[in-house]
Image (spheres, rainbow, N blue to C red):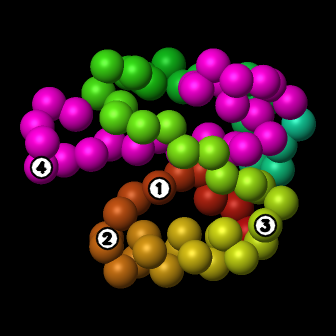
C-alpha cells in the first residue's frame, strides 16, 4: 500500500493461485472460472496475496464473523 499504516491483502483460492503466479486449477468458488483475475486487480497496491482453502467450511464462518466485526465488504460469498 502507499502508507505504512495500511496493508492490503488479496485473497485467492489455495487450489488456484493466479494472482500469486502459482498453479491454476479447480476450486470451490462458484461462478468464477479457473485462473480468474479481476479486471480491476492492481498488483501495485497489494502488499500480500493470501491463499485460502475453499474446501474448509469453517473458513466461511470465520470470514463472515471477521467481516461483520470489522465492517469489511467482501465478495463473492456463497453458502
Q: Does 24 sit above or below residue 53?
A: above
Q: Picture quarter containing residue 68?
A: bottom left
Q: Earlier in the sequence, mark 4 or mark 2?
A: 4
> Which segment did they paint magenta?
1-25
Q: Quadrant of the N terminus?
A: top left
Residue under pointer 3: 56
Tell me which numbered mark, 3 or 2, is placed earlier along the sequence.
Answer: 3
Badge 2 element: loop
Mark 3 closeness class: few <14, some 14–19, many ≥20 residues within 10 Å:
few
Q: Are circles 1 and 2 on residues that touch, CB within 8 Å?
A: no
Q: Where in the figure is residue 33, as x and y percent of width and height? A: 78, 29
* Nearer to the camera, 48 or 10: 48
Q: Residue at x 58, y 76 (%)?
A: 62
Q: What residue do we see at 66% from left, 69% from top?
A: 59
Q: The C terminus is located in which quarter?
A: bottom right
Magenta highlight on residue 72: no
Dot 4 surroundings within 10 Å: few (below 14), some, or many (20 or more)? few
Nearer the observer, disc 3 or disc 2?
3
Helix, strand or loop at label 1? It is: loop
The alpha-carbon separation of the residues under discs 3 and 1 comes to 18 Å
Q: Position of residue 14 (x, y in %)?
A: 73, 44
What's the mark number on residue 5? 4
Identify the element where label 3 is drawn.
loop
Amino acid at each position: 500500500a502507499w502508507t505504512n499504516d495500511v496493508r492490503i491483502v488479496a485473497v485467492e483460492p489455495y487450489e488456484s493461485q493466479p494472482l500469486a503466479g502459482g498453479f491454476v486449477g479447480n476450486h470451490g468458488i462458484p461462478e468464477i472460472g479457473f485462473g480468474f483475475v479481476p479486471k480491476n486487480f492492481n498488483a501495485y497496491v497489494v502488499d500480500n496475496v493470501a491463499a485460502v482453502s475453499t474446501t474448509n467450511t469453517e473458513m466461511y464462518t470465520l470470514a463472515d464473523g471477521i467481516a461483520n466485526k470489522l465492517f469489511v465488504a467482501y465478495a463473492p460469498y456463497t453458502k
